[in-house]
Image (tube, rainbow, N blue to C red):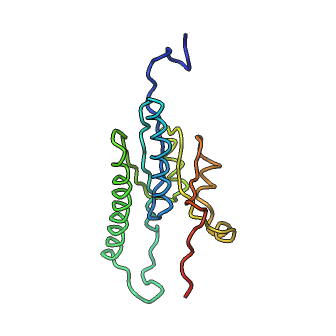
Amino acid sequence: MEVAGGAVGASSPPRRVVVAVDESEESMHALSWCLSNVVSAARAAAAPPPAVVLVHARSPRPFYYPAVDGAGYLLTQQVMDSMDQYMASAADTVVTKAKNICTAFPGVRVETCVEKGDPRDVICGAAEKAGADMVVMGSHGYGFLQRALLGSVSNHCVQNCKCPVVVVKRPGGEHQAPPRI
């Protein structure tokens, strides 16, 4: 008997789950949720754990830096290179933190993808490129006005990814707003 292109009992390739990570606690919570629910469920079903693809979108360097910024400071090539190094270092920190969370689940294959670009495009592109079975991402909990002005990365991914997208909210649904001064 054939089932979905393979014989009964034949092992299927492990599933691939793309997890979008950034500097926020919400994305790390989404990663923890994915590991606790998706990976643990695979183990409970005696299935191979899915490969977890950590995706981080770095802000692209603007095509044009003005010769003088708003405060009247000259932006030299050295300053621009320093900014690039800082963004690369920040990306490395995020990915390292996410990998450390994954170490609590031995046997999970972790891959990383760090690309420059708009997070919406990077996440959707990485999901397609990786052949993802699912995308997991956190919700920053922006209100209506912030979503209208900034756009919602999770909403874009839900609408444009070719695989299911799970948007994980923080427990209690409460997002802490920055303190008002």
Quadrant of the image for the N terminus? Answer: top right
Q: Residue at x 57, y 59 (%)?
A: 139
Residue situated in front as seen by the camera: 62 or 46: 46
**Residue 7: x, y in percent?**
49, 14
Q: Residue at x 36, y 40 (%)?
A: 109
Q: State how many labels appear.
A: 0
Residue situated in front as seen by the camera: 48 or 153: 48
Q: Quadrant of residue 80?
A: bottom left
On screen, residue 95 versus residue 134, left or right, reads left
Q: Quadrant of residue 79?
A: bottom left
Residue furthest out toward the left: 78
Residue furthest out toward the top: 1
**Residue 34: x, y in percent?**
48, 47
Q: Residue at x 45, y 40 (%)?
A: 40
Give the answer, above or below, for where 107 lies relative to 172: above
Q: Residue at x 55, y 88 (%)?
A: 181
**Residue 95: x, y in percent?**
37, 56
On screen, residue 15 versus residue 175, left or right, reads left
On screen, residue 2 versus residue 84, left or right, reads right
Residue situated in front as seen by the camera: 82 or 135: 135
**Residue 137: x, y in percent?**
53, 53
